[in-house]
Image (tube, rainbow, N blue to C red):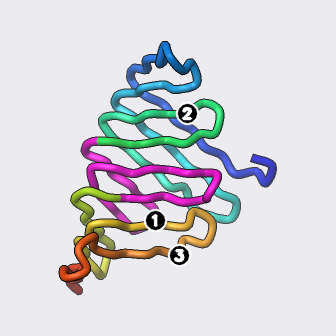
Amino acid sequence: DNLGNKFKIKSKTGKINIDNLNIVYMTNVEAIINLINSDPIIIRSNYAKYNKINYETNFEEDVLLTYQTHRITSQNIDLSFENNLATIYNKIEYDNNNVKLSADILKIDLITKNSKIFMIDENKKVMVLNK
C-alpha cells in the first residue's frame, strides 16, 4: 500500500472464477502480512478465496495464524484490508507462552494489534487457561 505495508499470498493451485475474474480460489495457501514496524503475520490454510482488486481474503479449513509467540488455529479467517481487520471464527484455539484460550470469535486490528474476543452466545464464556 501507500505506507509500505505488504501482503504476499501463494498457493499450490488457483482457479479463477469465470463469473468474476478478480476472484481466485486457492488451495494449500500461505499468506504473509508485512506491516511497517511490525513482525510478519503468517496465515496458512487448506483453502482461500482471494479478491485481486481489494485483497480481501477468506481462509478456510485448518487455518493457522502465527505472529511472534502467538499461535491461533481456527476453521476461518477473513482479512479486510479496507478495514484493517482480521476476523477469526469457528473453533478458535489461541496459544502463546503463558495463555491458552478458546472462543467463538476473535477480531484483530491489523494496525494496532488490539483484539476483541467473545462468544456468539452471551450465556457462554471465553475459556482462558494460564500455563
Q: Earlier in the sequence, mark 3 or mark 2?
A: 2
Give the quadrant of residue 8.
top right
Answer above or below: position of 58 versus 80. above
Q: Taken as a whole, is the magenta stretch helix, strand or loop?
A: strand
Where residue 5 appears, as percent x and y from the top left, is 69, 51
Where residue 120 appears, as percent x and y from the top left, is 27, 70
* Mark 3: amino acid: Asn
Residues at marks 2 and 1, CA–CA distance in whole angstroms: 27 Å
Disc on res. 41: none
Which residue is rendered at x = 23% and y = 86% of the image?
130
Q: Secondary structure at mark 2?
A: strand
Q: Earlier in the sequence, mark 2 or mark 1?
A: 2
Q: Nearer the viewer, mark 2 or mark 1?
A: 2
Circle 2 sits on which residue?
Answer: 51
Q: Nearer the viewer, mark 3 or mark 1?
A: 3
- The answer to whether 126 appears left or right of 96 in the picture is left
The local crowd at label 3, few if under 14, some if 14 to 19, many if 20 or more residues have their Cα within 10 Å, is few
Is 99 part of what is drawn in magenta? no
Q: Which residues are magenta?
A: 61-88
Circle 1 sits on which residue?
Answer: 68
